Amino acid sequence: MIDVKNKHITIAGAARSGVAAAILLKKKGAVPFLSDSGPVDDKFANKLRSESIEFEEKSHSERAMQGEFLVISPGVPTSSPIAQKYLTDQKSIFSEIEMASWFNRSPIVAVTGSNGKTTAVNWMHHTWKTAEKECIVAGNIGYAFSELVDQTEEANDALLEVSSFQLDHINTFHPAVAVILNITPDHLDRYDNDFEKYAASKFRITENQTSDDCFIYNADDATVSGFAKKLSKRENAPHMMAFS
């Protein structure tokens, strides 16, 4: 986990995830500054003002470029000027879900895929409720992880829907259980119209898993099953479970 106390941190994108990230960072002792190249919705602007968090809209000023690192919202592409400036300056970029995971105390069950993520996570939530097992549900569904991470406990689980955009800038994000449902061409404009780059982003969900963890994958998806075969040869690879 990166110590954020007293650090000046820029967050790019002032929608749900970005605002939640800014509030969490302030709560943890950081000095967040939120920057959006477009207009900020009134409900988010009012929320930021109520939390005494400084922000700007319709531009990324020089101040926005001076953060110790950048927390990037899913809607802000890596090709954006602010992200490119941080990369040029050799400063780190972290996704909101990565940053939130620094403060997580629960085992993470993370689901990604081109189709069916929300349905799968809703089904999991129903299953946990039926079993009377405590959990939070966040990520690309309902709430940003930053909004709920302080509710996590070792005895509970964090059920997360995770997009490729959220996986683009992870570093230590570590699901105890990672699930890839399928990978089909989608959002390729964010990946230089290169399906392999898009798939590689999805595969990052297993990046920090070890033999103590579990990877569940769709054996009927040729792209996913091909990746699973390669992953199984990795030293300290996670336990593999296929479904079809």
Image: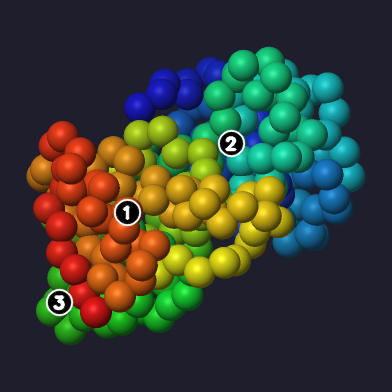
CA–CA distance in space, label 1 to label 3:
34 Å
Q: Which residue is rendered at x = 41% and y = 33% of the image?
A: 171
* Cα–Cα gap, marks 3 and 2: 35 Å
Residue at x 28% of width, y 38% of height: 208
Q: In what quadrant of the picture does the C terminus appear? A: bottom left
Decide if residue 19 is in sight here. no
Foreground pick, 45 / 34: 34
SS class, disc 2: strand
Residue 93: quadrant of the picture: top right
Image quadrant in which you'd find residue 62: top right
Q: Residue furthest right?
A: 58
Label number found at residue 227: 1
**Residue in the picture at 53% in, 18% down:** 6
Locate residue 48, reporting x and y percent: 69, 46
Residue that badge 2 annotates: 71
Work out whether residue 65 can be spotted: yes
Which of the two discs, 3 and 2, labels the residue nearer the N terminus? 2
178 lies left or right of 169: left
**Residue type at numbered disc 1:** Phe
Is residue 52 or residue 96 the one in the foreground? 96
